[in-house]
Image (cartoon, grey):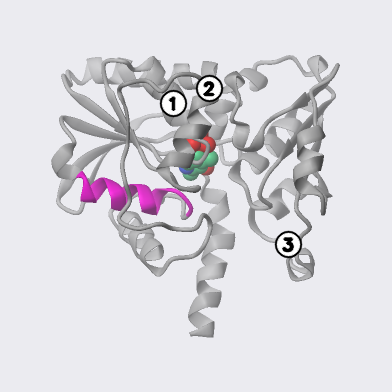
């Protein structure tokens, strides 16, 4: 087992949490799982990894850590950064640059990204690691969950995990057909998430998308997210500030519809908390 499961009491309910955030400080959570195949790949297989996305992405930092370990060149494409950001680098971006990531800012982001291709010794990983390459590592996670469930004699298990690209929730549901997997869209809405997941195949029937009480913009600081983060931390576990608050809030709203024991898969991403907490502090100052 790569990670343990701990009981977690929150807001009057009993949960279990799969502690994937503790696998590794940099390569943690579902990013470890999604990059598992590459972690197992001999270094000589590639010399360069290309990827793209947001400038504080959790996936970006994990790929940077992987490339650092393997000695692979890592080019990461993003939209041009604000000058202010470049003058005071923080969080995942700073950590990834320190690991040797080459940041390729491009004004023509969509065109540039569309032209990125895997070639001999060069691998192009889609944003957030949303790739069939992720399946093997998430299948391993599914096997660990099944083994734990059997040891605990749990007959009915519901699994909860937040979605960005939906890759984790999709492959978990695919490899846990006897359990129900619940998720919610942190990026865009559930309709957009469904489209993203359909690129991986047909949506498994045991995968349920829960509807949040209102729409949120990804990575925007919401005071109620900070409040939920603080309550969770007070209850004993630190979660990320980007995905977990919305997932927990949506889960609590839907408790009457969820059966059996509930296992929340902690998908890591704690390193991004430094820059998010700084943004929340900035909000408080400007009030
Ligand atoms: C990356 C990430 C997600 C999203 O995972 P997907 O497989 O893209 O849906 C969720 N939670 C955390 C903490 C993450 O870092």
Q: Residue at x 49, y 48 (%)?
A: 188
Q: Which residues are magenta?
A: 242-254
Q: If you read the primary sequence from the N terminus, does the residue marked by circle 1 or circle 3 appear first?
A: 3
Are the residues tagged 2 and 1 within 8 Å (C-beta)?
yes
Q: CA distance from mark 3 to mark 2?
A: 35 Å
Which disc number belongs to residue 89? 3
Which disc number belongs to residue 170? 1
Q: Which tag is nearer the camera, tag 2 or tag 1?
A: 2
Residue 114: percent from left, percent from top = 76, 35
Q: If you read the primary sequence from the N terminus, does the residue marked by circle 2 or circle 1 appear first?
A: 1
Q: Residue at x 79, y 23 (%)?
A: 118
Q: Residue at x 27, y 21 (%)?
A: 179
Circle 2 is placed at which residue position?
200
In this image, 255 relative to 63: left or right?
A: left
Are the residues tagged 3 and 2 within 8 Å (C-beta)?
no
Seen in the picture, residue 175 relative to 158 is either above or below; the reply is above
- Report whether the residue tagged 1 is closer than 8 Å to ligand 1: yes
Mark 1 burial class by Cα count in 10 Å: few <14, some 14-19, many 20+: many
Q: CA distance from mark 1 to mark 3?
A: 34 Å
């Amino acid at each position: 087992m790569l990670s343990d499961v701990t009981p977690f009491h929150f807001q009057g309910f009993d949960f279990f949490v799969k502690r994937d955030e503790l696998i590794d400080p940099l390569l943690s959570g579902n990013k470890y799982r999604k990059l598992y195949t590459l972690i197992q790949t001999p270094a000589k297989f590639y010399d360069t990894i290309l990827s793209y996305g947001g400038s504080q992405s959790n996936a970006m930092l994990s790929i940077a850590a992987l490339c650092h370990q393997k000695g692979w060149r890592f080019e990461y494409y993003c939209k041009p950064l604000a000058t202010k950001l470049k003058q005071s680098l923080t969080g995942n971006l700073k950590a990834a640059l320190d690991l040797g990531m080459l940041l390729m800012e491009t004004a023509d982001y969509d065109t540039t990204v569309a032209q990125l291709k895997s070639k001999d010794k060069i691998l192009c990983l889609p944003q957030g690691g949303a790739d069939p390459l992720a399946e093997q590592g998430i299948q391993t996670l599914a096997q660990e969950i099944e083994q734990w469930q059997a040891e605990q004699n749990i007959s009915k298990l519901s699994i909860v995990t937040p979605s960005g690209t939906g890759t984790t929730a999709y492959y978990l549901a695919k490899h846990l057909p006897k359990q129900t997997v619940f998720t919610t869209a942190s990026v865009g809405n559930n309709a957009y998430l469904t489209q993203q997941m359909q690129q991986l195949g047909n949506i498994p029937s045991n995968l349920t998308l829960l509807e949040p009480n209102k729409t949120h913009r990804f990575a925007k600081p919401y005071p109620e997210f900070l409040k939920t983060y603080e309550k969770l931390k007070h209850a004993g576990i630190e979660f990320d500030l980007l995905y977990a608050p919305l997932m927990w809030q949506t889960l609590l709203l839907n408790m009457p519809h969820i059966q059996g024991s509930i296992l929340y898969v902690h998908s890591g991403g704690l390193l991004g908390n430094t820059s998010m907490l700084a943004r929340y502090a900035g909000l408080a100052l400007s009030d």
